Amino acid sequence: MIFLSSNSDSTTLIFIFILIGLIIIFLAYYFNTKQKIIRTLSKLPIKQIGSLKNNELTRFSGKALHVKEPLIAPFSKRKCVFYIMKIEQKKSNGKSSYWRTIVNEEKIQEFFLEKNGDFAIVRPKQVPKNYMSYLVIDKKTNSGTFNDPAPKFKALLNHYNINNEGFFGFNKKLRYSEGIIEIGEQITVAGIAKWKSLKEPIEGYSYSKIAELEGTIKQKLIITDLPNIKSKAHF
């Protein structure tokens, strides 16, 4: 009877550990930035710029266009209004290994959204941060022990003062990832709509006022290039 009881207790403990593991995996997935953005956007109606109302939290999709000189993505050298990049190095810790972040850079500037000749302006701020974002990673590269970094990657590592070689001249295991909002790319932004007087004319835009999508610390702008996010309502 003692043996049976111990066996039953072990089975129960295994089940509890598995259940806890599944709950942790579900919570990590449910609350990650990508899923939070998808859930929030799916609750907002897709509107045309002309129908935006002051102080209304709204969602709008259109082409991203630069207001001033565009940013240049560090690796791909594409013109953009927003980029994120990360350089990581693989490290060993006993029997396990992990990726340590060496550089984690994010740059964004104000930009226009255009659709069918209508414009809105988006003014994200990094300090204090008034937006949350998710960009699709579309450029990657890496190097390893017997894999020399490509010339573009080597130049990038030099720019950030990262030596790609370790002891005995072997290459470090490094990887790079980059996501951007390119000029002319179709994206989605959600924010609080405000109609404001246009200080300077925009080529091809004949109106004296322009819609601005704003964010605050509490109600952040949402910026993403995720495609095909469905909405429960369309206007």
Image (cartoon, helix red, strand yellow):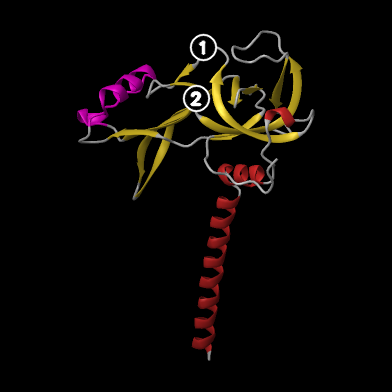
Residue at left 58%, top 30%? 62
Residue 26, placed above or below residue 48:
below
Q: Can residue 125 be seen in this snapshot?
A: no
Q: Amino acid at mark 1?
A: Glu
Which quadrant holds the C terminus?
A: top right
In the image, residue 149 lies at what x, y percent?
Answer: 26, 28
Occupied quadrant, residue 216: top right
Q: Disc 2 marks which residue?
A: 184
Secondary structure at badge 2 equals: loop
In the image, taking residue 97 as reference, residue 113 lies left or right, namely right
Residue at left 35%, top 47%? 94
In the image, taking residue 148 as reference, residue 136 lies left or right, namely right
The residue positioned farthest toward the top in the image shown: 200
Relative depth, front residue between 25 and 220 = 220
Give the Cα separation between the discs numbered 1 and 2: 14 Å
Q: Amino acid at mark 2?
A: Gly
In the image, residue 7 lies at what x, y percent?
Answer: 49, 82
In magenta segment, residue 108 = no
In magenta segment, residue 158 = yes
Residue at left 25%, top 31%? 171
The local crowd at label 1, few if under 14, some if 14 to 19, many if 20 or more residues have their Cα within 10 Å, is few
Residue 136, placed above or below residue 23:
above
Q: Can residue 92 be seen in this snapshot?
A: yes
Secondary structure at badge 1 equals: loop
- Which dot, 1 or 2, sits closer to the camera? 2
The residue positioned farthest toward the right in the image shown: 54
Relative depth, front residue between 77 and 8 = 77
Q: Disc 1 marks which residue?
A: 69
Q: Which residues are magenta?
A: 148-171
